[in-house]
Image (cartoon, helix red, strand yellow):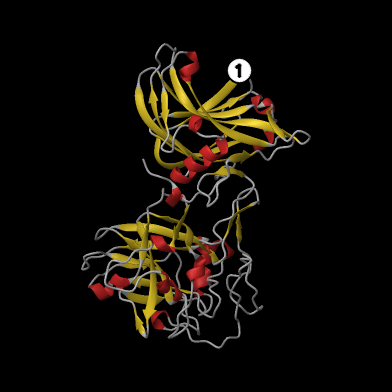
Amino acid sequence: MVKKFVDLSACALLLGAVACSKTNETTGITEDGNPIAEVSSSSSFVPESSSSSSDGSARYKFDLWNGSNGAARVNVGNNAGYWYSVDDEDDGGSSSIKFPVSLENESVIGKMDSLVSFCGGMCGTVELGEGSSTPSAGVGIALAEKDSTIDISDWDGLCISYESELLMKGILGYKEGEVDATAENMPSVNFEKTAKGAASSRCAQWTDFKQNSANVNSGSSIFKKATSLIFKFYGNPKESGYFNIKGVSSYKHGIVESETCLWNGTLKEPSDFVKMGSSGVSSGFWYAYSDNDVGGASIMIWENGSPDEYMNSSQWVSDVVSAKGGLSASVSLDKGNAIQAFAGVGIKIVGFDEETSDYYPMAGNIEDWGGLCVTYMAEMDMRVILVSDSVNEKGAVLNKAITPTEKCLTWKDMATEGLEKTARAIKFELSGDSSAQVRFNVIAIGKYLPDGACVIDESRVASF
């Protein structure tokens, strides 16, 4: 595997080694979780780790690198942290990467910053060539200075925000004594393709990184002697694909959601209730429902048991979400003696009585949300419904999607006709006139934003 530095600064040498005087040292990841590095004014870092959504609120917070800042240097706590390119030349291949801006006429130090500023990340088009049995090319980060290693075990793993038209692998380079690990010995983890033009945020723990060879050192010791972090893209000869790596974070500190995301089932510790974020509204409690009360025979099958088997709903939600990355069930639709079969999950809006410490159902004004963003999967069209009372409810269709999909709808799109001012519940419902066996998963919910409200970790979502 040939490494080619994209940023040929005075500090960068070939093979991922960096040899510089330590005039611009930065702090690394601190135990108290502060992701912002302290840097000198001459450093190429931009000490700001948040990118913003369209309403100006922070959606991401990366403790290692954020492409939206326009700075190329990665905060690994030393004088390394430089990006470089890799290909398959050592394997006889001819793959390469085409970058969207020319790097020929830039100043030495500004080459990479120019690319990152243009892309809002590290981007390019991979062109897979012939000659190698596994065509590949990609980009990497030099984690350590020349002839040295770095201990990244306390990162716990890796989170990245990216888009890619090709399969991407995260690969860790390390040293055994004075010898660099060979390609087959480097632990790696797969990051799947993403929807075209849409970035995904996905995480992997160090235990998710696997080695091809069983006859090598493995385990946590590898992550204590790291040298590089590589993102390689794979496919068939003559295939090409665009990629953009937008942010890199340790698993330990992850990605910080904005206030627009009200519930996210893919967080490391997802809440068992939905935060409402509106004046006078306390919370939203999850519940399941079906057509059984009106003569239907539909059944909801939960991997961790039905909610009736639990002492409290909080534990039921926690178990289901931990297993599936959302509120997920298999539904057997059967209308029985009902007019139509239906089943689903809902969020009941509640208030809190401070004197009695009791929750109670209430009508809440959620007009200021502007609408809803729902991240979901469903094997048939599903409806999101806003309920005001037993006879007033309006909704819209969430089209069939077998991979995690976020759909954002304004109140006008849902034709709620003012019901958002007296909302009592939000439902996610499957329905039909004929029997069917389908699966669904409500993964995340947020206030309306045109470009989405929630950043999910798709690695936590169980596939259908």
In the rendered image, which quarter contains the C terminus?
Answer: top left
Residue at mark 1: 390
Query: Residue 297 appears in which quarter of the rendering?
Result: top left
- Dot 1, crowdedness within 10 Å: few (<14), some or many (≥20)? few
Q: Examine the rendering and report whether any part of residue 181 can be seen.
A: yes
Q: Examine the rendering and report whether any part of residue 448 can be seen.
A: no
Callout 1 amino acid: Ser
- Label 1, secondary structure: give it: loop
Q: Is residue 122 above or below residue 410?
A: below
**In the drawing, does residue 413 fall left or right of residue 160?**
right
Q: Position of residue 296 (x, y in %)?
A: 43, 16
Q: Position of residue 21 (x, y in %)?
A: 55, 88
In the rendered image, which quarter contains the N terminus?
Answer: bottom left
The residue sitting at 38% across, 25% down in the picture is 332
Q: Is residue 387 above or below residue 173?
A: above
The residue sitting at 50% across, 80% down in the picture is 108
The mark total stands at: 1
Q: In front here: 3 or 275?
A: 275
The residue sitting at 36% across, 18% down in the picture is 434
**In the drawing, does residue 322 fall left or right of residue 257?**
left
Query: Residue 98 appears in which quarter of the rendering?
Result: bottom left
Q: Position of residue 144 (x, y in %)?
A: 47, 79
Q: Is residue 70 above or below residue 285?
A: below
Instruction: Name, please, the residue furthest toward the bottom.
Output: 21
Q: In front here: 342 or 451?
A: 342
**In the drawing, does residue 245 fall left or right of residue 355?**
left
The residue sitting at 41% across, 21% down in the picture is 298
Q: Position of residue 189 (x, y in %)?
A: 37, 61
